[in-house]
Image: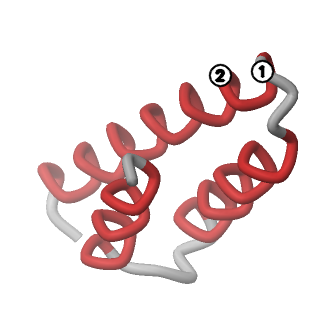
Amino acid sequence: MTKSEHQELRTIIDELETKAAYAKLHFNYLKANMFNDWIDQIKNCDVGLKEARQMLHASTL
């Protein structure tokens, strides 16, 4: 994994963490848990950059 790919993954994680915090703030715990699960999958390298991008895209729908 290149440095730019690693940086993009970190950016995706940061955005998902923000979305999870906002969801929890608005008592939408199901959505917050989903975002946190995605974050864990990315951090554990269970998904690649392509899948992480798809997760971020899905979080905006």
Q: Count of labels shown?
A: 2
Residue type, label 2? Tyr
Residue 12, position in %: x, y?
37, 45
**Label 2, on which residue?**
22
x then y, percent, for residue 14? 46, 33
Label 2: how many residues lie within 10 Å, few (<14), some (14-19) or many (20+)? some
Q: Could you tell me which secondary element the residue under label 1 belongs to?
A: loop
Is 8 placed left or right of 52 in the picture?
left
User: In this rendering, is residue 57 above or below 31?
Assistant: below
Q: Residue at x 19, y 58 (%)?
A: 5
- Residue 53 sits above or below residue 30 on the image: below
Q: Within the image, what quadrant is residue 41 found in?
A: bottom right
Q: Is residue 13 left or right of residue 6?
A: right
Q: CA distance from mark 1 to mark 2?
A: 6 Å
Front one among 3 and 55: 55
Classify mark 2: helix, strand or loop.
helix
Image-based side of 57 in relation to 5, left or right:
right
From this view, report whether residue 49 is shown above or below residue 47. above
Task: Point out the residue furthest to the top here.
Answer: 25
The N terminus appears in which quarter of the rendering? Answer: bottom left
In the picture of the structure, the residue carrying the numbered disc 1 is: 26
- Out of 58 and 2, give the one closest to the viewer: 58
Identify residue type, mark 1. His
Q: Are circles 1 and 2 on residues that touch, CB within 8 Å?
A: yes
Residue placed most toward the observer, 8 or 34: 34
- Crowd rating for badge 1 (residues with CA inside 10 Å; few <14, some 14–19, many 20+): few
Q: Nearer the viewer, mark 1 or mark 2?
A: 1
